[in-house]
Amino acid sequence: MHALDVLAAAAAANSVNLWGALGCAVAYSASLLATLDAFADLILARGDSPAGRLTPGVGLKFASKLVAAAIAVIAAAIVLALDDNWFAFTTLTIAFVVVVGIGVIVLLRHSKATAPEHAPTRTGG
């Protein structure tokens, strides 16, 4: 009986904190949505402004969403690493990087597509 108690205690000490992992998954997903929302704001703001430039308010809003997302992702990654939950750490980080990478590609494609529209035209001769 004593050996079973020792094994149970060892298993409990090595178990993963599922509530912590769930909280970190929520932080990653909220950060992902904030990042994609910032990208959408950037696309919409560039389309609405005549010169394709950002106003200071829109730029501040864009940057604050990205900084808040970065803080949340880094904090969640630290919690997962401290819990030795490398599976959740790896899968959530890969998913975050892949989706943000797709968002960056869409953002860059949109910038290239709208660049000729906002380019100055020369008239006269």
Image (spheres, grey):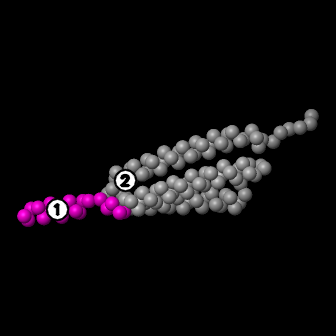
Q: Is residue 63 left or right of residue 50?
A: left
For the stretch drawn in magenta, the main secondary structure is: helix
Q: Residue 112 lies in magenta, yes or no? A: no
Q: Is residue 32 above or below residue 113?
A: below
Mark 1 element type: helix
Between residue 98 and residue 82, name the one nearer to us: 98
Q: Is residue 102 above or below residue 10?
A: above
| Residue farthest along the left direction in this orientation | 1
Q: Is residue 4 above or below residue 123?
A: below
Q: Position of residue 120 (x, y in %)?
A: 81, 42
Magenta stretch, residue numbers:
1-20
Q: Earlier in the sequence, mark 2 or mark 1?
A: 1
Identify the residue shown where x is 46% and y is 60%: 27
What type is the residue that disc 1 sits on? Ala
Q: Is residue 94 left or right of residue 11?
A: right
What type is the residue that disc 2 sits on? Ala
Residue 78 in view in this figure: no
Which numbered marker is on residue 88?
2
Identify the residue shown where x is 32% and y is 62%: 17
Give the residue at mark 1.
Answer: 8
Q: Position of residue 44 (x, y in %)?
A: 68, 51
Residue 39 in view in this figure: yes
